[in-house]
Image (spheres, helix red, strand yellow):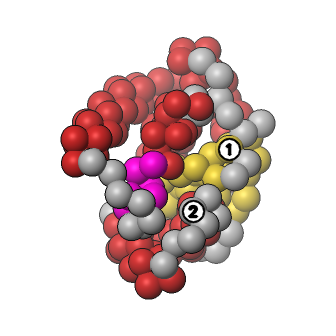
Amino acid sequence: MISITSQNVSFGHRRLARHAEQIADRAAGLIRSNFGALPDVQILISSRSDALADFVHESKVSLLPGADPREVAKQLRWERRGLRGKYGVTELSAGGIVLGINLGKARTVADVNETLTHELLHAHQLSGRAAREEHLAYLRYGFEIEPLPRRKVRAYERVMDRREREARDAERLASQLPA
């Protein structure tokens, strides 16, 4: 199931937000037909990257009990800074996957289409039980909750690079979405 929320959408981005809301189910259908099942996905559409970072960060931290508050604050600062230059972000949540679309970066309908297909493929990639557990272990390592051997860290970073290449290749499916 795809649920969509728009928050802090500036006047100039309202048309893109409406477009994203209208095509999200169609984009999810494309991903399902080409790659397989999608988990429950909650999409936040916003013009403010810091609002997206807060949304994604809260869902991530809810999965990481015992995280040091200083490390949590440090990660939030890092996420806010990193999201300014990104079109979207995908992360695990307790109920499935959260996905953020940064309208401050996306300028055209084609950008929104490509971002939705890209991030929905990441949602598919993180939907398996093994992928979810592997990602949670990496998050616990990133938040300094529990150590992870360097070999496993490097191996998971290679997996993330491969997933990113797959998602970039899947952006070609966006041409099948209405403009």
Q: Residue at x 33, y 51 (%)?
A: 148
Q: Residue at x 53, y 18 (%)?
A: 35
Residue ID for mark 2: 64
Which residue matches tag 1?
96
Disc 1 crowd, CA 10 A, few/some/many (<14, 14-19, 20+)? some
* Amino acid type, residue under disc 2 in the picture: Leu
Q: Looking at the figure, which quarter contains the C terminus?
A: top right
Q: What residue type is disc 1 on?
A: Gly
Whether residue 89 is visible to the viewer of this picture, yes or no, is yes
Number of marks in picture: 2
Instruction: Find out whether residue 140 is within the magenta segment.
Output: yes
Number of residues whose C-alpha sits closer than 10 Å to that of mark 2, classed few (under 14), some (14–19) or many (20 or more): some
Q: Position of residue 156 (x, y in %)?
A: 32, 39
Q: Is residue 121 visible?
A: no
Residue at left 52%, top 72%?
Answer: 67
Image: magenta residue range: 137-142
